[in-house]
Image: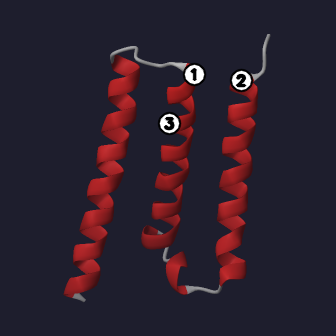
């Protein structure tokens, strides 16, 4: 139980660090085309960490884990396509 608690604490710290990173990029107006891809990737990583560790999907069969992976991947991909399309 202690090991699981420690793992969740590490995951939480990673989530907070990625969120602060995204916040600082926006606050300091350091957004560029390449950094948008980095932000989308960090958003995908954060979503996977939440679904695996805090929703408990890490211990289930892969077919059930694929549902949020595919959903999150499609949403992130659509946001990326919408951002990179020329107007």
Q: Which of the labelled discs sits on residue 39, or is there none?
A: 3
Give the SS element for disc 1: helix
Task: Please state the horizontal and vertical placement of residue 53, each as a whole percent of the image.
Answer: 43, 71
* Disc 2 to disc 3: CB gap under 8 Å: no
Residue furthest to the top in view is 87
Q: Nearer the viewer, mark 3 or mark 1?
A: 1
Q: Is residue 56 left or right of residue 17?
A: right
Is the C terminus in the top left, top right, bottom left or bottom right quadrant?
Answer: top right
**Left of 66 or right of it: where is 13?**
left
- Residue 55 position (above or below residue 31): below
Q: Which residue is mark 1?
A: 33
- Residue at (46%, 62%) from the top-left corner? 49
Residue 75 on image: x %, y %: 70, 45
Q: What residue is shown at x 71% (from left), y 68% (from top)?
A: 67
In the image, 30 versus 3, the foreground residue is 30
From the image, which quarter does the N terminus lie in?
A: bottom left
Rendering coords of residue 41 (x, y %): 54, 45
What residue is drawn where x is 66% and y is 63%?
68
Task: Report if the CB atoms under discs 2 and 1 are less than 8 Å apart.
Answer: yes
Residue at the (50%, 71%) spot, across then down: 52
Q: Is residue 61 above or below residue 41?
A: below
Is 73 left or right of 46, judged from the image as shown?
right
Q: CA distance from mark 3 to mark 1?
A: 10 Å
Does label 3 or label 1 sit earlier along the sequence?
Answer: 1
Q: Disc 2 versus disc 3: distance between alpha carbons?
A: 13 Å
* Residue at the spot of label 2: 84
Circle 2 sits in a helix, a strand or a loop, which is it?
helix
Q: Is residue 87 above or below residue 67?
A: above
């Amino acid at each position: 139980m202690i090991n699981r608690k420690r793992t969740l604490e590490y995951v939480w710290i990673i989530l907070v660090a990625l969120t602060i990173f995204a916040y600082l990029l926006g606050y300091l107006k350091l957004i560029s085309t390449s950094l948008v891809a980095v932000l989308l990737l960090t958003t995908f990583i954060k979503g996977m960490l939440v679904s695996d560790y805090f929703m408990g999907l890490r211990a289930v069969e892969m077919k059930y884990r694929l549902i949020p992976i595919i959903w999150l991947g499609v949403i992130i991909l659509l946001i990326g396509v919408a951002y990179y399309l020329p107007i």
